[in-house]
Each structure stands twice: as C-alpha cells, then as structure tokens.
Amino acid sequence: MFASVDDITITYEEEGVEVIKEIDKVILSKGAWSTILFRYQQWAPAKNAYSEDKYSIRRYRKTGGEYRQQSKFNISSPDQAAQLADTLKSWLSE
C-alpha cells in the first residue's frame, strides 16, 4: 500500500495496459484519516480509447504505517459533478 498520503494514486495497470489513468488529485484532508478527490480516465477496450474524465472521492485510513482505502464515492457523470459543486457553493454562501 502507501506509506505517505502524497504517494496515493488510483493509477492501475493490467497486462501492460494502464486501465485507470490518474489525471489529477487534490488531497482534501491529511492525517490518520485522509480524503482525496481524483480526476481520472478509464480504458475502454471496445473503443480502444480512454473515457471522458471521471471523478472519485476516496477515504483512506492509516494503519500499521500504511494507508488503506476505506470507502469511495464515484461521481457518475459531468452533470452530477456540476450539480455537486453548485450545491456546495450555494450551501457555503448561506
């Protein structure tokens, strides 16, 4: 696993193919429990191309000196991502 929160990635390779390609990440919180927002693309073999950008919020817990994923929420579409951002902005401006 990962010893440092800065080293955590969702990049994943299978049989020499980068199946999950991490585009960017933002560490939202650090500590024994860390939260990271990832922007990534997924390989689509049928199309022989990567998907459009996808997003995932993941929580990691440090135990035994290593970070292990505890939970995740995948944002299912650009529309859902925009709705989430708009809702948070409106709540924060109240």
Image: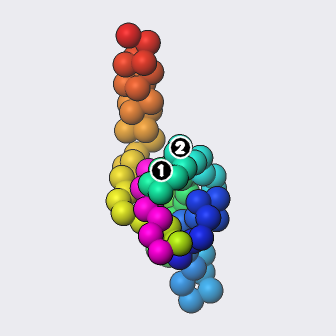
Badge 2 crowding class, 10 Å Cα cut-off, few under 14, some 14 to 19, many 20 or more, is: few
Tell me where residue 39 appears, x and y as whole percent: 55, 51
The answer to whether residue 50 is above or below residue 91 is: below
The answer to whether residue 10 is above or below residue 33 is: below
Instruction: Report the residue that reaches farthest toward the front.
Output: 64
What is the spatial separation of the Cα atoms under label 2 and label 1, in whole angstroms? 5 Å
Q: Magenta: predominant secondary structure element? A: strand
Q: Give the magenta-colored segment's residue range.
A: 56-64
Q: Image point 53% across, 76% down: which residue?
A: 1
Q: Is residue 43 visible?
A: no
Whether 51 is among the magenta residues is no
The answer to whether residue 47 is above or below residue 32 is: below
Badge 1 crowding class, 10 Å Cα cut-off, few under 14, some 14 to 19, many 20 or more, is: many
Assess whether mark 1 and mark 2 are in contact (beta carbons under 8 angstroms). Answer: yes
Numbered circle sitting on residue 35: 1
Q: Quadrant of residue 18?
A: bottom right
Q: Nearer the viewer, residue 93 or 40?
A: 93
Q: Label 2 is placed on what type of residue?
A: Leu
Q: Quadrant of the C terminus?
A: top left
Q: Earlier in the sequence, mark 2 or mark 1?
A: 2
Mark 1 lies on a secondary structure that is strand
Q: Label 1 is placed on what type of residue?
A: Thr
